[in-house]
Every structure is written in C-alpha cells, then in structure tokens.
Amino acid sequence: MSTGAGGYVVKSSAARELLSAVETVLQGKRFVSAGLAGNVFVTSNPGASHGARPTDPNPYLRLAGSASISEFLASVMAATAADFGALQLYDSRNQVLRIVAQHGFENEFLEHCNTAGLKAGSACNQSMEARTRIVVKDVAADPLFSNDLKGLLLRAKVRSIQ
C-alpha cells in the first residue's frame, strides 16, 4: 500500500470481496480484505474499506454502463498489452454472464458472450462454476471448447482467455 496500490484482496476472499474492492478503488478510496484488518499495515490506512457490503447484490446491475468499468478495462488491457478485451459480470437476476465493457470485438462475439448462460461449456462458465480463475493459453488446442465455439473465438481473433 505504501508504494501506491489502491487495494489489496486476499485470493481466498476474492469471490466475496473483489467487486466491492474494484468499486471502492474506482471511487478513489482504498480497499483491504477484511481478513487483514488486524495487520499493522492495514491500520495505518484510515481510508481502507473493511468488508463493506454493496447495497445491490447483482454486480451487473450495479456496474453496467459505468465509465469507471471502461477505464478499468482499458488499464488492464494496457498492463497486459492486449489488443482486445471484454469484462463480464454475473447478472444474478437472469443467471448469465453479461459484458459490461469491451474493446475491439465485433457483433458475433459480443452477442454470444452477452447471453452465455452458466450451462454453456466455456471458460467463463467453468470459471463461474468453480469460483476460480481459468486460463486457456491456446483456444485452438484446448478441449474445453466445442468446434462451434472454438470457431467463433478464432474468428474474433481470441487466442487465449483468462
């Protein structure tokens, strides 16, 4: 935190705290995982948000259309030198992943990814079910994808997914 980080989320708390952390940091405040509240480096940060809970539990409804989310995606793309990027959040009302920000993708990809239910066999849905990050290094070679989905991803110039 002393080197300029805006927040810190412990991996084991990411499922509960990541969205709150992103929202807090995008508002210009600091965020530290609630599990670290007793540590010395946290107590020196009076602006930290310890386990704050959002008022609306649906991340998609809270953040869809937010300029801050687009800025967040742009910063992630810059940091990873990505040419394309999309950020999906879970829409709990409709039980689907929906795109809240994207750059560089065309309609075929966007329409598919914006309506992906949790039952569709893809990296995004596997990640949601397992509640962990999924990394696909080579879309063309990964057995996770059906031929149709693999074709869609390759036409969209998606070669890897995280």
Image: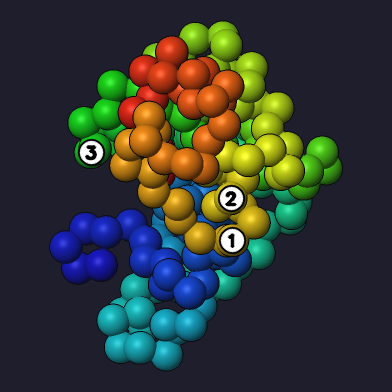
Residue visible at 64% across and 17% down in the picture: 111
Left or right of 15 in this view: 80: left
Write down the quadrant of residue 53 in the picture.
bottom right
Label 1, secondary structure: give it: helix
The image shows residue 50, relative to residue 152, as above or below, that is below
Q: Which residue corresponds to mark 2?
A: 126
Q: Which residue corresponds to mark 3?
A: 79
Left or right of 2 in this view: 142: right
Residue visible at 49% across and 26% down in the picture: 150
Residue 13 position within the rendered picture, expressed as x and y whole percent measured from the top left: 51, 72
Count residues near mark 2 (Cα–Cα under 10 Å), then give few for <14, some for 14-19, many for 20+: some
Give the Cα distance between marks 1 and 2. Answer: 6 Å
Is residue 100 visible in the rendered structure shown here?
A: no
Tag 1–tag 2 contact (CB < 8 Å): yes
Q: Which residue corresponds to mark 1?
A: 130
Instruction: Identify the image quadrant of the C terminus.
Output: top left
Give the Cα distance between marks 1 and 3. Answer: 26 Å
Task: Tell me the amino acid under the disc marked 2.
Answer: Gln
**Mark closest to the chain's N terminus, 1 or 3:** 3
Label 2, secondary structure: give it: helix
Left or right of 105 in this view: 138: left
Instruction: Identify the image quadrant of the N terminus.
Output: bottom left
Residue visible at 58% across and 22% down in the picture: 148
Task: Tell me the amino acid under the disc marked 1.
Answer: Ala
Count residues near mark 1 (Cα–Cα under 10 Å), then give few for <14, some for 14-19, many for 20+: few
Residue 99 position within the rendered picture, expressed as x and y whole percent measured from the top left: 59, 29
Residue 94 position within the rendered picture, expressed as x and y whole percent measured from the top left: 82, 38
The image shows residue 10, relative to residue 133, as above or below, that is below
